[in-house]
Image (spheres, rainbow, N blue to C red):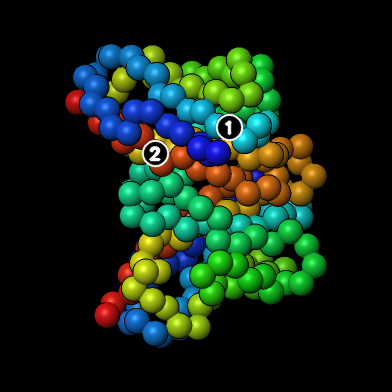
Amino acid sequence: NAGVTQTPKFQVLKTGQSMTLQCAQDMNHEYMSWYRQDPGMGLRLIHYSVGAGITDQGEVPNGYNVSRSTTEDFPLRLLSAAPSQTSVYFCASSVSGELDTQYFGPGTRLTVL
Amino acid sequence: AQSVTQLDSQVPVFEEAPVELRCNYSSSVSVYLFWYVQYPNQGLQLLLKYLSGSTLVKGINGFEAEFNKSQTSFHLRKPSVHISDTAEYFCAVSVRNSGNTPLVFGKGTRLSVIA
């Protein structure tokens, strides 16, 4: 099993550009989520999904879109990048959201100029 | 709503010394509690979790944590640290029987082990 994979590892964008961060898991997990990590802020939840076709907002959803058309994939879209979105983004998956171990991807480091 | 407070943002400690990383949570309902570790330039991985039963939970790499309901705490301890324990540690909480409400993470404690 590859676990949770994220692409790209690094990305530099200009303000106003759009892009999609990819996340895939091969563990047949129903629950997937996106976090951003900023110094001194810990991990903050952007969006999450409890299964294909179902998504919900987390703590900091503004400026991001998600969709979940398959169990395996959960892409995160930045519609119009802003410098405030400079961060490290982590995707995670688990069997459920409550008591199961979350498995994290290696992260995508995004810089918006 | 739940919240997690990690009382120390940075903890320096000498190699082979004991360490305690403190975590307090706030919730009006019963919770599950977790500690995750993040090594430099990596994603997070589970260290240990408390679901029910014994309040002393043992995890990987010699770490343990104790759930104290009256003090709403879940402090992480290790009796003797190694250089390889240098990492950032995150406490997290989720609500029991919540229908998949997401984890809430603390802001992290950076543990630096000094040779």
The residue shown at (53%, 24%) is A74
Disc 1 secondary structure class: loop
The residue shown at (80%, 67%) is B53
Q: Which mark is residue A26?
A: 1
| Quadrant of res A15 | top left
Residue B70, percent across and down? Answer: 72, 71
Question: Which residue is disc 2 drawn over?
Answer: A107
The residue shown at (68%, 25%) is A51
* Rendered position, A100 above or below B11: above
Q: Choose the circle earlier in sequence order: 2 or 1.
A: 1
Which of the two marks, 2 or 1, is nearer to us in this view? 1
The quadrant of the image that shows the N terminus of chain A is top right
The quadrant of the image that shows the C terminus of chain A is top left
Q: Is residue B24 visible?
A: no
Disc 2/disc 1 C-alpha distance (Å): 17 Å
* Rendered position, B104 above or below A109: below
Q: Judge left or right: residue A90 versus residue A30.
A: left
Amino acid under disc 2 = Gly
Q: Judge left or right: residue B65 versus residue A46.
A: right
Check contact, mark 2 vs mark 1: CB within 8 A.
no
The residue shown at (33%, 70%) is B112
Q: Using the image as rendered, state which of residue A24 and residue B22 is in the foreground.
A: A24
Q: Is residue B63 visible?
A: yes
Q: Chain of mark 1?
A: A
Residue B16, percent across and down? Answer: 39, 85
Residue B101, percent across and down? Answer: 68, 39
* Rendered position, B60 above or below A111: below
Q: Judge left or right: residue B14 versus residue A42.
A: left
